[in-house]
Amino acid sequence: MKKQLLLLFIFFCFSKLIYSQDYKHAIGLRLGESNGFGAAVSYQQFITQKNRIELNLGWLNNTNSTIKLTALYQWVMPLKDDFYWYFGAGAGLFNFNNNNTDNTTTLLIAGNLGIEYRLDIPLQIALGVRPELGFISEINNLHLNTALSVRYRF
């Protein structure tokens, strides 16, 4: 009986340690509308509780092979309880390959604004908008990329 109580106590202490940890990373999917590029793998590295870096890698492979990499610096502010809002800015690369005949690489600058909810389990859900402006090629246009993100925090 003493061993069972000791194991139960250790399990309780370990579960409290896991539950109360500060998460430093998050990885998941950013699901946007197709004009903004569609789905992307999203990674966040928290620098402090109020600052983080977000990296997104998206690709399309229909009639064109297209890859987009975006890096953003974000400021995160609490709203209420587990709700947060964030804003940020960054840059990225966009490579468009049209049936292996036209290969174009464009630099882009981006802003970011959104809200997120952090569940009690290590999962966060975010809704954000990212205006992106491409330049230094013939793909010079502005996209207003809205997306829903789901990430696992660890």
Image (spheres, helix red, strand yellow):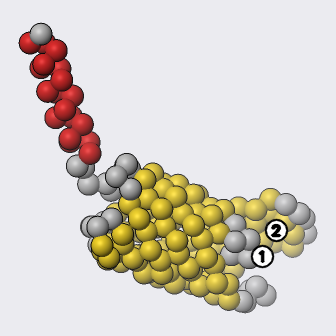
In the rendering, which numbered label is found on residue 143? Answer: none
**Residue at figure coordinates x 32%, y 76% from the top left:** 79
**Residue at figure coordinates x 36%, y 72% from the top left:** 84
> Residue 86: which quarter of the image?
bottom left
Question: Is residue 37 in view?
Answer: no
Q: Is residue 66 left or right of residue 77?
A: right
> Where residue 151 sits in the image (x, y, percent)?
48, 56
In the rendering, which numbered label is found on residue 104? Answer: 1
> Residue 96: which quarter of the image?
bottom right
**Residue at figure coordinates x 72%, y 89% from the top left:** 141
How many labels sit on residues? 2
- 147 and 25: which one is in front? 147
Q: Residues within 10 Å of mark 1 (few under 14, many from 20)?
A: some
> Where residue 102 sits in the image (x, y, percent)?
87, 73
Question: Is residue 48 in view?
Answer: yes
Q: Is residue 96 above or below residue 152?
A: below
Q: Secondary structure at mark 1?
A: strand
Q: Secondary structure at mark 2?
A: strand
> Where residue 121 sits in the image (x, y, percent)?
37, 48
Q: Residue furthest left?
A: 2
Residue, disc 2: 97
**Residue at figure coordinates x 63%, y 78% from the top left:** 145
Q: Is residue 67 left or right of residue 111?
A: right
The quarter of the image holding the N terminus is top left
